[in-house]
Image (tube, rainbow, N blue to C red):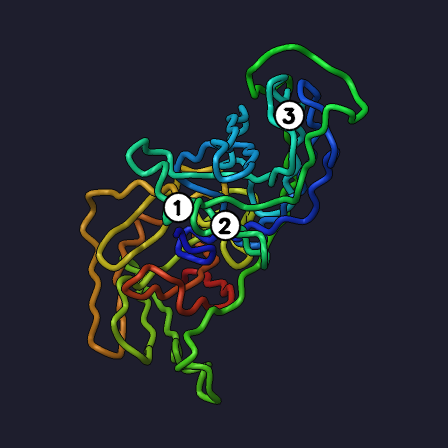
Amino acid sequence: MEEINNRLGYRLTLTTADFNEQLRPGGVLNLTVDLQNTGFASIINERPLYIVLVGQDAIPPYKVQLDIDPRHWEPGTATFSAKVHIPSNAEEGDYRLALWLPDGYESLRDNPLYSIQFANENVWDESNGYNILGSINVDKNAAGSYQRGEKFEVIEANSSVERSVVSITPVLPQALKSPVVNAIISNIQISNDADNLYLSFDYTGSDYNAFQMFIDADQDPQTGYLIHGIGAETLFENHTMNIYNGSGNDWNWAPTELLIHFEDMSGQIRWNISRSLLRSSKLDIVFQLVDTNWDIVFVTDQMTYTLK
């Protein structure tokens, strides 16, 4: 199962799901779903979005893919609506209505371990990888319009997103939740001379995959990668300098071939960066640690430095 809190940074919560709970065979399902992404990023990899009707065990589930890209569900509120035709030969009875977001690769699509799970309690069907919205009863005596056809198919679908600016707070492993928590990153030092910018900090703990420094050179949170109040155009991750190519919330960094002086001295980190690589003399900076599972361990507050 894909973790709902991970390096990619999205966390999807089902807010509401409105639909007609009784339908006749050949009728039309009207579904409107509101989701909240309370993370700091959107889904990065391709994810098909399916509406699924799950009947009795002997009946194969009905599945139909919506022409909606979940990668557009940025931090904030996402809403989508769909009208779906119920097959006119559908068996009467109770069905579970679900959303299914499997892996984009065909080889992994039917493996529920790779499906996206919403953060809500009591909606996850772990055996199939479905997020259950509720129940629907199919009854030939139900009211509503009727249309012949044996396909479970989409009549129309649309979606919208209301983006919000999300600030992340430090995410700490349980073992580090103590009175010394502020010392995970401490003694931050930033200075410069005519040629270089020098940055260092002390850290506690071990087994970190990456030490990351995000730099916002234009000091505009609406441009660059959104993290803790800044819009970073540049990421220094260990020895690597990366340039942001995304839309603000997706993890889309292009590594450069520039050699960055970086030292990890088992308790202290140091970067020496040529001033020629920086586009401004005034920088907003955020430091971040990620562990061996690429989970966020700690994020500093935004700080601003002016080169002298």
Helix, strand or loop under label 3:
strand
Q: Residue at x 64, y 23 (%)?
A: 84
Q: Is residue 182 above or below residue 147?
A: below
Describe residue 183's horizontal placement relative to residue 301 as left or right: left
Which amino acid lies under the numbered mark 3 shown in the image of this protein? Asn
Depth check: 133 or 234 in front?
133
Name which of mark 2 and mark 3 comes first in the sequence.
2
Q: Is residue 249 above or below residue 281?
A: above
Mark 2 vs 3: CB contact within 8 A: no
Mark 1 vs 2: CB contact within 8 A: yes
How far apart are the alpha carbons under marks 1 and 3?
Answer: 26 Å
User: What residue is pinned by disc 2?
Assistant: 125
Outermost top residue: 148
Helix, strand or loop under label 1:
helix
Residue 121 at x, y percent in the picture? 58, 59
Q: Quadrant of residue 89?
A: top right
How far apart are the alpha carbons under marks 2 and 3?
Answer: 26 Å
Residue 16 at x, y percent in the picture? 70, 46
Residue 105 at x, y percent in the picture? 32, 33
Residue 67 at x, y percent in the picture? 53, 23
User: What residue is pinned by disc 1?
Assistant: 112
Mark 1 vs 3: CB contact within 8 A: no
Which amino acid lies under the numbered mark 1 shown in the image of this protein? Pro
Which amino acid lies under the numbered mark 2 shown in the image of this protein? Asp
The C terminus lies in quadrant: bottom left
Q: Residue at x 29, y 56 (%)?
A: 237
Describe residue 267's horizontal placement relative to residue 282 as left or right: left
User: What residue is pinned by disc 3?
Assistant: 158
Name which of mark 1 and mark 2 comes first in the sequence.
1
